[in-house]
Amino acid sequence: MEMHQVRYFLAVARTLNFTRAAEECNVTQPSLTRAVQKLEDELGGLLFRRERALTHLTDLGRQMLPLLDRTFEAAQAAKALAKGIGKAQVAPLHLGIASAIDSDDLHAVLSEVASGLAGFELSTTEGSSAELLEHALKGDLDLIVIEAPSDVHERLEPWQLFEQHYRMIARHDHPHAVRENASFADFVDEAWIDCGPDSAARLRAVAEAAGVDITFRHKVSNPRQADRLLLAGLGTALMPTPKNDQLCAVMLLDEGLVAPVILASIAGRRRSPAADAFVRAARARDWPDR
Protein backbone atom coordinates (compact mmCIF):
# COMPACT_ATOMS: atom_id res chain seq x y z
CA MET A 1 0.00 0.00 0.00
CA GLU A 2 1.37 3.39 -1.02
CA MET A 3 0.22 6.72 0.34
CA HIS A 4 -0.77 8.15 -3.04
CA GLN A 5 -3.18 5.23 -3.45
CA VAL A 6 -4.79 6.11 -0.14
CA ARG A 7 -5.01 9.77 -1.18
CA TYR A 8 -6.72 8.85 -4.46
CA PHE A 9 -9.15 6.54 -2.64
CA LEU A 10 -10.11 9.30 -0.21
CA ALA A 11 -10.67 11.75 -3.09
CA VAL A 12 -13.01 9.32 -4.87
CA ALA A 13 -14.83 8.55 -1.60
CA ARG A 14 -15.37 12.28 -1.06
CA THR A 15 -16.48 13.16 -4.60
CA LEU A 16 -17.99 9.81 -5.65
CA ASN A 17 -16.69 10.67 -9.10
CA PHE A 18 -13.44 9.34 -10.60
CA THR A 19 -13.10 12.26 -13.03
CA ARG A 20 -13.46 14.97 -10.37
CA ALA A 21 -11.19 13.02 -8.00
CA ALA A 22 -8.48 12.88 -10.69
CA GLU A 23 -8.77 16.63 -11.22
CA GLU A 24 -8.46 17.25 -7.47
CA CYS A 25 -5.36 15.06 -7.26
CA ASN A 26 -3.89 16.58 -10.45
CA VAL A 27 -3.48 13.22 -12.19
CA THR A 28 -5.07 11.59 -15.20
CA GLN A 29 -8.17 9.50 -14.63
CA PRO A 30 -6.52 6.26 -15.89
CA SER A 31 -3.63 6.76 -13.42
CA LEU A 32 -6.04 7.31 -10.55
CA THR A 33 -8.15 4.33 -11.55
CA ARG A 34 -5.09 2.03 -11.71
CA ALA A 35 -3.94 3.20 -8.28
CA VAL A 36 -7.35 2.50 -6.75
CA GLN A 37 -7.43 -0.93 -8.43
CA LYS A 38 -4.00 -1.76 -6.96
CA LEU A 39 -5.30 -0.75 -3.55
CA GLU A 40 -8.30 -3.01 -4.03
CA ASP A 41 -5.97 -5.88 -4.94
CA GLU A 42 -3.97 -5.17 -1.77
CA LEU A 43 -7.11 -5.19 0.40
CA GLY A 44 -8.68 -8.14 -1.35
CA GLY A 45 -11.95 -6.67 -2.59
CA LEU A 46 -13.74 -3.88 -4.40
CA LEU A 47 -13.85 -0.49 -2.68
CA PHE A 48 -16.25 1.17 -5.13
CA ARG A 49 -19.18 0.00 -7.22
CA ARG A 50 -19.92 1.95 -10.39
CA GLU A 51 -23.41 1.73 -11.83
CA ARG A 52 -23.60 3.93 -14.94
CA ALA A 53 -23.11 7.50 -13.68
CA LEU A 54 -23.44 6.50 -10.03
CA THR A 55 -20.39 5.59 -7.95
CA HIS A 56 -20.69 4.50 -4.33
CA LEU A 57 -18.65 2.74 -1.68
CA THR A 58 -18.97 -1.00 -1.19
CA ASP A 59 -19.26 -2.50 2.30
CA LEU A 60 -15.49 -2.99 2.29
CA GLY A 61 -14.99 0.60 1.16
CA ARG A 62 -17.16 1.94 3.98
CA GLN A 63 -15.21 -0.07 6.55
CA MET A 64 -11.86 1.00 5.14
CA LEU A 65 -12.74 4.70 4.85
CA PRO A 66 -12.20 5.76 8.51
CA LEU A 67 -9.08 3.60 8.82
CA LEU A 68 -7.45 4.93 5.66
CA ASP A 69 -8.52 8.47 6.52
CA ARG A 70 -6.70 8.22 9.88
CA THR A 71 -3.70 6.62 8.17
CA PHE A 72 -3.44 9.48 5.70
CA GLU A 73 -3.84 12.14 8.43
CA ALA A 74 -1.13 10.46 10.52
CA ALA A 75 1.22 10.37 7.54
CA GLN A 76 0.62 14.06 6.86
CA ALA A 77 1.23 14.91 10.51
CA ALA A 78 4.47 12.89 10.50
CA LYS A 79 5.68 14.74 7.41
CA ALA A 80 4.86 18.11 8.95
CA LEU A 81 6.66 17.15 12.18
CA ALA A 82 9.74 15.96 10.30
CA LYS A 83 9.80 19.16 8.26
CA GLY A 84 9.45 21.24 11.43
CA ILE A 85 12.32 19.40 13.11
CA GLY A 86 14.48 19.85 10.02
CA LYS A 87 13.85 23.59 10.14
CA ALA A 88 14.28 23.67 13.94
CA GLN A 89 10.63 24.73 14.27
CA VAL A 90 10.10 21.76 16.58
CA ALA A 91 12.74 20.84 19.17
CA PRO A 92 11.65 17.80 21.20
CA LEU A 93 13.54 16.62 24.28
CA HIS A 94 12.90 13.30 26.01
CA LEU A 95 14.34 13.75 29.49
CA GLY A 96 14.55 11.20 32.28
CA ILE A 97 14.78 12.51 35.86
CA ALA A 98 15.29 10.11 38.76
CA SER A 99 12.42 10.25 41.24
CA ALA A 100 14.74 10.93 44.18
CA ILE A 101 16.14 14.10 42.60
CA ASP A 102 14.51 17.45 43.29
CA SER A 103 16.42 20.60 42.42
CA ASP A 104 15.25 24.15 41.81
CA ASP A 105 18.33 24.64 39.65
CA LEU A 106 17.15 21.84 37.37
CA HIS A 107 13.86 23.69 36.95
CA ALA A 108 15.82 26.85 36.11
CA VAL A 109 17.77 25.05 33.38
CA LEU A 110 14.52 23.83 31.80
CA SER A 111 13.14 27.37 31.91
CA GLU A 112 16.30 28.73 30.28
CA VAL A 113 16.16 26.19 27.46
CA ALA A 114 12.45 26.83 26.87
CA SER A 115 12.95 30.59 26.67
CA GLY A 116 15.91 30.35 24.31
CA LEU A 117 14.81 27.57 21.95
CA ALA A 118 11.83 28.09 19.67
CA GLY A 119 9.63 25.03 19.31
CA PHE A 120 10.92 23.38 22.51
CA GLU A 121 8.75 20.36 23.37
CA LEU A 122 9.56 18.50 26.59
CA SER A 123 8.48 15.04 27.66
CA THR A 124 9.76 13.65 30.96
CA THR A 125 10.01 10.18 32.43
CA GLU A 126 10.46 9.33 36.10
CA GLY A 127 11.89 6.20 37.66
CA SER A 128 14.90 4.87 39.49
CA SER A 129 18.36 5.79 38.25
CA ALA A 130 18.91 2.23 37.01
CA GLU A 131 15.61 2.18 35.10
CA LEU A 132 16.32 5.50 33.40
CA LEU A 133 19.81 4.39 32.40
CA GLU A 134 18.31 1.31 30.77
CA HIS A 135 15.76 3.45 28.87
CA ALA A 136 18.55 5.77 27.68
CA LEU A 137 20.68 2.87 26.43
CA LYS A 138 17.67 1.59 24.46
CA GLY A 139 17.26 5.02 22.83
CA ASP A 140 14.00 5.94 24.58
CA LEU A 141 15.52 8.99 26.32
CA ASP A 142 17.78 11.75 24.99
CA LEU A 143 19.23 12.74 28.37
CA ILE A 144 18.99 11.48 31.93
CA VAL A 145 19.53 13.14 35.30
CA ILE A 146 20.33 10.36 37.75
CA GLU A 147 22.42 9.43 40.74
CA ALA A 148 25.81 8.31 39.44
CA PRO A 149 26.07 4.51 39.29
CA SER A 150 28.93 2.90 41.21
CA ASP A 151 30.23 1.43 37.95
CA VAL A 152 29.88 3.96 35.14
CA HIS A 153 28.64 2.26 31.97
CA GLU A 154 31.14 2.48 29.11
CA ARG A 155 28.51 3.97 26.80
CA LEU A 156 27.57 6.69 29.28
CA GLU A 157 28.81 10.26 28.77
CA PRO A 158 28.30 11.91 32.19
CA TRP A 159 28.65 15.43 33.59
CA GLN A 160 28.40 15.85 37.36
CA LEU A 161 25.92 18.52 38.43
CA PHE A 162 25.89 18.45 42.23
CA GLU A 163 26.02 16.18 45.26
CA GLN A 164 22.74 15.23 46.87
CA HIS A 165 22.87 14.78 50.65
CA TYR A 166 20.43 12.34 52.22
CA ARG A 167 19.04 13.01 55.69
CA MET A 168 16.61 11.44 58.09
CA ILE A 169 13.26 13.19 57.57
CA ALA A 170 10.57 13.15 60.23
CA ARG A 171 7.82 15.24 61.79
CA HIS A 172 8.86 18.06 64.11
CA ASP A 173 7.64 16.21 67.18
CA HIS A 174 9.83 13.18 66.48
CA PRO A 175 12.09 12.36 69.47
CA HIS A 176 15.23 12.95 67.40
CA ALA A 177 13.97 16.11 65.68
CA VAL A 178 15.97 18.42 67.98
CA ARG A 179 19.29 16.75 67.17
CA GLU A 180 21.66 18.48 64.78
CA ASN A 181 23.33 15.25 63.75
CA ALA A 182 23.18 11.57 64.60
CA SER A 183 24.47 8.16 63.68
CA PHE A 184 22.36 5.60 61.88
CA ALA A 185 22.79 3.25 64.84
CA ASP A 186 20.58 5.63 66.87
CA PHE A 187 17.56 4.57 64.81
CA VAL A 188 17.47 0.83 65.41
CA ASP A 189 13.74 0.77 66.16
CA GLU A 190 12.59 3.26 63.49
CA ALA A 191 9.67 2.48 61.20
CA TRP A 192 11.12 3.48 57.83
CA ILE A 193 9.22 4.53 54.74
CA ASP A 194 10.45 3.08 51.44
CA CYS A 195 10.67 6.13 49.15
CA GLY A 196 11.79 4.36 45.98
CA PRO A 197 14.68 2.24 44.69
CA ASP A 198 17.44 4.87 44.91
CA SER A 199 16.63 5.91 48.47
CA ALA A 200 15.89 2.37 49.66
CA ALA A 201 19.14 0.97 48.24
CA ARG A 202 21.17 3.72 49.91
CA LEU A 203 19.35 3.20 53.20
CA ARG A 204 20.01 -0.55 53.16
CA ALA A 205 23.69 -0.04 52.35
CA VAL A 206 24.23 2.45 55.17
CA ALA A 207 22.27 0.26 57.62
CA GLU A 208 24.35 -2.78 56.71
CA ALA A 209 27.57 -0.82 57.21
CA ALA A 210 26.30 0.32 60.63
CA GLY A 211 25.27 -3.20 61.60
CA VAL A 212 21.63 -2.21 61.88
CA ASP A 213 18.63 -4.21 60.69
CA ILE A 214 15.98 -1.96 59.19
CA THR A 215 12.31 -2.57 58.54
CA PHE A 216 10.30 -0.81 55.83
CA ARG A 217 6.82 -0.52 57.26
CA HIS A 218 5.34 1.69 54.52
CA LYS A 219 6.07 2.30 50.87
CA VAL A 220 5.48 5.11 48.37
CA SER A 221 6.28 5.27 44.66
CA ASN A 222 8.42 8.43 44.90
CA PRO A 223 9.79 10.73 47.63
CA ARG A 224 7.23 13.48 47.02
CA GLN A 225 4.44 11.15 48.16
CA ALA A 226 6.27 10.42 51.41
CA ASP A 227 5.26 13.79 52.88
CA ARG A 228 1.72 12.53 53.54
CA LEU A 229 2.97 9.59 55.56
CA LEU A 230 5.57 11.64 57.40
CA LEU A 231 3.04 14.32 58.34
CA ALA A 232 0.75 11.59 59.64
CA GLY A 233 3.56 10.40 61.92
CA LEU A 234 3.74 6.98 60.28
CA GLY A 235 7.51 6.77 60.29
CA THR A 236 10.71 8.33 59.02
CA ALA A 237 12.28 8.49 55.60
CA LEU A 238 15.71 8.89 54.04
CA MET A 239 15.44 11.81 51.63
CA PRO A 240 17.08 15.12 50.70
CA THR A 241 16.06 18.15 52.74
CA PRO A 242 12.25 18.48 52.84
CA LYS A 243 10.40 21.56 51.63
CA ASN A 244 7.43 21.16 53.97
CA ASP A 245 7.77 23.40 57.03
CA GLN A 246 6.17 20.78 59.28
CA LEU A 247 9.00 18.32 58.62
CA CYS A 248 12.57 18.43 59.84
CA ALA A 249 15.84 16.91 58.70
CA VAL A 250 18.49 15.29 60.90
CA MET A 251 22.00 15.10 59.46
CA LEU A 252 23.38 11.56 59.67
CA LEU A 253 27.13 11.22 60.12
CA ASP A 254 27.40 7.82 58.44
CA GLU A 255 29.29 7.30 55.19
CA GLY A 256 27.40 6.66 51.96
CA LEU A 257 24.72 9.31 52.34
CA VAL A 258 26.07 11.63 49.65
CA ALA A 259 25.02 10.83 46.08
CA PRO A 260 26.68 12.50 43.07
CA VAL A 261 23.97 13.57 40.62
CA ILE A 262 24.92 13.49 36.94
CA LEU A 263 23.50 14.59 33.64
CA ALA A 264 24.25 11.96 31.01
CA SER A 265 23.78 11.12 27.37
CA ILE A 266 24.86 8.07 25.42
CA ALA A 267 28.36 8.38 23.98
CA GLY A 268 28.51 8.50 20.19
CA ARG A 269 24.80 9.26 19.80
CA ARG A 270 24.08 12.52 18.03
CA ARG A 271 22.26 14.96 20.31
CA SER A 272 19.18 16.83 19.11
CA PRO A 273 19.16 20.66 19.19
CA ALA A 274 17.07 20.58 22.38
CA ALA A 275 19.32 18.02 24.08
CA ASP A 276 22.41 20.00 23.08
CA ALA A 277 20.88 23.22 24.45
CA PHE A 278 20.02 21.51 27.73
CA VAL A 279 23.55 20.11 28.12
CA ARG A 280 25.12 23.50 27.44
CA ALA A 281 22.79 25.30 29.86
CA ALA A 282 23.32 22.69 32.58
CA ARG A 283 27.11 22.69 32.26
CA ALA A 284 27.26 26.48 32.34
CA ARG A 285 25.24 26.68 35.57
CA ASP A 286 26.88 27.06 38.99
CA TRP A 287 25.28 24.10 40.80
CA PRO A 288 25.23 24.29 44.59
CA ASP A 289 25.53 21.06 46.54
CA ARG A 290 22.17 20.09 47.92
Image: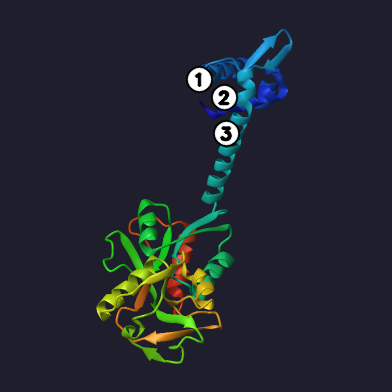
| Earlier sequence position, callout 3 versus callout 1 | 1
Q: Which residue is mark 2?
A: 5
Residue 152 location (% of width, % of height): 28, 65
- Mark 1: amino acid: Glu
Q: Which residue is mark 3?
A: 71
Point 53% across, 79% down: residue:
243
Name the secondary structure under disc 3: helix
Cβ–Cβ under 8 Å for marks 3 and 1? no
Tell me the quarter of the image containing the C terminus.
bottom left
Q: Which residue is mark 1?
A: 42
Q: Counting other residues with Cα less than 10 Å from the Cα at mark 3, is it few (<14), some (14-19), or many (20 or more)?
A: some
Q: Counting other residues with Cα less than 10 Å from the Cα at mark 2, is it few (<14), some (14-19), or many (20 or more)?
A: some
Disc 2/disc 1 C-alpha distance (Å): 11 Å
Disc 3/disc 1 C-alpha distance (Å): 15 Å
Residue 277 location (% of width, % of height): 48, 64
Point 55% across, 29% down: residue:
3
Rendered view: 246 above or below 155: below
Point 41% across, 81% down: residue:
167
The outermost residue toward the front is 189
